[in-house]
Image: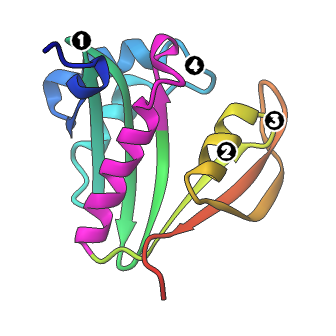
Amino acid sequence: MQKAWSDRILVKAMASNDVEAVVDLEKQVFSPWNKSLIKSELKYASSIALVVKTAGELAGWCCCRYENTEAELLKMTVAEKWRRRSVATRLLNALESRLRAMSVESLYLEVRAKNVPATTFYNQAGFTVTGRRINYYSQPNDHALILQKLLYDH
């Protein structure tokens, strides 16, 4: 029996040999990170950077920083052809699992208010709006929504 493509998704810690593929992926999105920013995430002890690969290619990546019981998702990018195919969900689930293992209680992020696909995804993933930053983004101008997800039920 042949495996479904979703069974061939591999989420793993980002390594230095993933950087070039991540840089190429970032060139396809708004507010792309450059190579030095991406590489710097591999150096911080308080950083988690993950990549997701499927069909032998990079499908997405994310990184966050954590301190004590809080973490901030700094970046999540999924290649256009892999969007709406559970790649982001797998990536987020893997990140949350790692954070829970380190007793992190909440995960924060900022997202463009006009990025409806992203805000919908995060809402469905259990995030709630906790704040707004007016005129936070430029090119194009937009507000930022601050979202939070509690990783433990209290």
- Nearer-the-camera pick, 78 or 54: 54
Q: Which residues are magenta?
A: 76-102
**Disc 1 designates what residue?**
55
Q: CA distance from mark 4 to mark 2?
A: 14 Å
**Disc 2 designates what residue?**
111
Magenta region, mostly helix, strand or loop? Answer: helix
**Mark found first going from the N terminus, 3 or 1:** 1
- Looking at the image, how many numbered discs can be counted on the residues? 4
Q: Check disc 2 and give the amino acid type.
A: Val
Label 1, secondary structure: give it. loop
**Disc 3 designates what residue?**
114
- Residue shown at the point (48%, 40%) measured from the top left: 75
Label 4, secondary structure: give it. loop
Q: Check disc 4 and give the amino acid type.
A: Val
Q: Check disc 3 and give the amino acid type.
A: Lys
Instruction: Give residue 1's mark.
Output: none
- Residue shown at the point (30%, 49%) measured from the top left: 94
Residue 68 falls within the magenta-colored stretch: no
- Residue shown at the point (79%, 43%) measured from the top left: 113
**Disc 4 designates what residue?**
29
Can residue 151 be seen from the camera position used here?
yes
Q: CA distance from mark 2 to mark 1?
A: 29 Å
Of circles 3 and 1, the one toward us is 1
